[in-house]
Image (cartoon, helix red, strand yellow):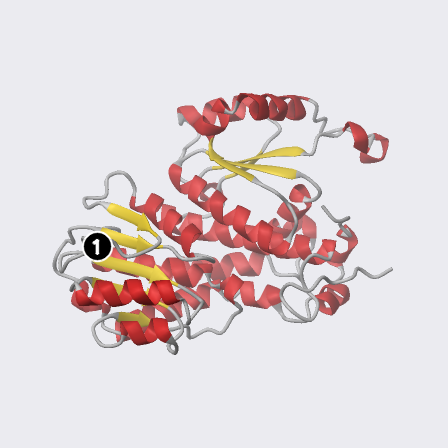
Amino acid sequence: MNTVDDTLLDDLDRIAEVDTDGLLHAAAMAGAQVRATSEAAQEAGIARLAGGMPRALVLITRPGLSPVAAKLLHTLLGRACPVPVVLTDTAPTWLGPLDVVVAHTDDPGDGMLAESIDRARRYGAGVVLTAPEEGPVAAAAAGQCVLVPPRVPVPPPFGFHRALAGGLITATTLELLRTDLDIVADELDREAERDHMQHETFVNPAKSLALRLAERSPLLWGLDDVATGVAWYAAQVLATHTDLVSDVAAYPQAASRTALHRAATRASAGTDIFADPDDVDPAQVSPLRVFLLAISASASDPVRRLAVDTFPAADLLVPAEEITADETTCAAVLALRFQLAALYLGLAAGTTGGTTTYAPARPRE
């Protein structure tokens, strides 16, 4: 990874200088996006989907944030979901009036999605679409579909919580999930405040996470299904704003990757938390760093106990130990923390910021 100028993180003038597009502010609008999406869905008539359990819930995934939002929604619905949940990149040919389709895109001209929405509508399926209100995709949804356009303007890489909210309100309306989106939005606002750039690194969870991710190869291993869903999103935002390459897996799957797991174990065993960083030879430091994510896995969970025993020096990220909230809210909060951490790291390394979202910012000499 590019060299990280960690002094930038606590220098408000320099952060403002490189964050010319207001990316940190855009990320902090996650709570507002959830509220606006919920309100827009209600106004678009999502209530007409209530009153009957669908035959299947179909999550159409298109390039961008849609796949990671769909994966997280799938894990939140869980194995006990009373209806099949199908992840697909196009509308299946078997769709019918008893099915409900959920889709998200930031590309109003996605022709393949437009065809899928049109097919679902013609077959009589219920459709909830979060997308811009102009273009071929919106035109395909005209009439019978619940079209939820963005009301909080942010760049496309910052629409994850809007995409997730569209799926959550659909699942809640269908009584497949119980989620209070107002509570989710409130906790996202509180997380954004905790991670505000005015707060110094030692009290700022996102800045602290950014430094732990810096110049490493993160192993983002979930201790439960929902946490693994968050890990997939974390890898997405790290790849969007930094040049870090991440490994994502549920911990039992990670343990089956014997060579990588063994290397991570050696790297963890060689970590001395009392060592003076100036005395450590960088050539002798493994780039691997284990991050264990837990949403529903309690301290007594066998998978969590095994992972923590194996990697006592790993970063253990457990939102439920910081906030009192349900799994959905904890997952949304941890996702936002990773997004802000990726932004701080990208700004400090010069891989994001500048005049556009993807233009590198040069650290001050």
Camera-nearest residue between 315 and 135: 135
Q: Residue furthest bottom?
A: 134
In the structure shown, which secondary structural element does the residue marked by tag 1 occupy?
Answer: loop
Q: How many marks?
A: 1
Residue 146, image x and y in percent?
26, 70
Whether residue 282 sits left or right of residue 314 in the image: it is right
Type of amino acid under label 1: Thr
In the image, residue 284 sits, relative to residue 169, either above or below, namely above
Camera-nearest residue between 194 and 359: 359
Camera-nearest residue between 133 and 160: 133
Residue 258, image x and y in percent?
54, 21
Residue drawn at (58%, 26%) of the image = 260
Whether residue 140 sits left or right of residue 293 in the image: it is left
Q: Read off the residue under disc 1.
A: 93
Q: Is residue 237 in view?
A: yes
Q: Is residue 326 in view?
A: no
Q: Image quadrant for the C terminus?
A: bottom right
Whether residue 41 sits left or right of residue 280 in the image: it is left
Q: Image quadrant for the N terminus?
A: top right
Residue 251, image x and y in percent?
47, 30
Camera-nearest residue between 163 and 35: 163
In the image, residue 302 sits, relative to residue 160, either above or below, namely above
Q: Quadrant of residue 61?
A: bottom left
Residue drawn at (53%, 48%) of the image = 234
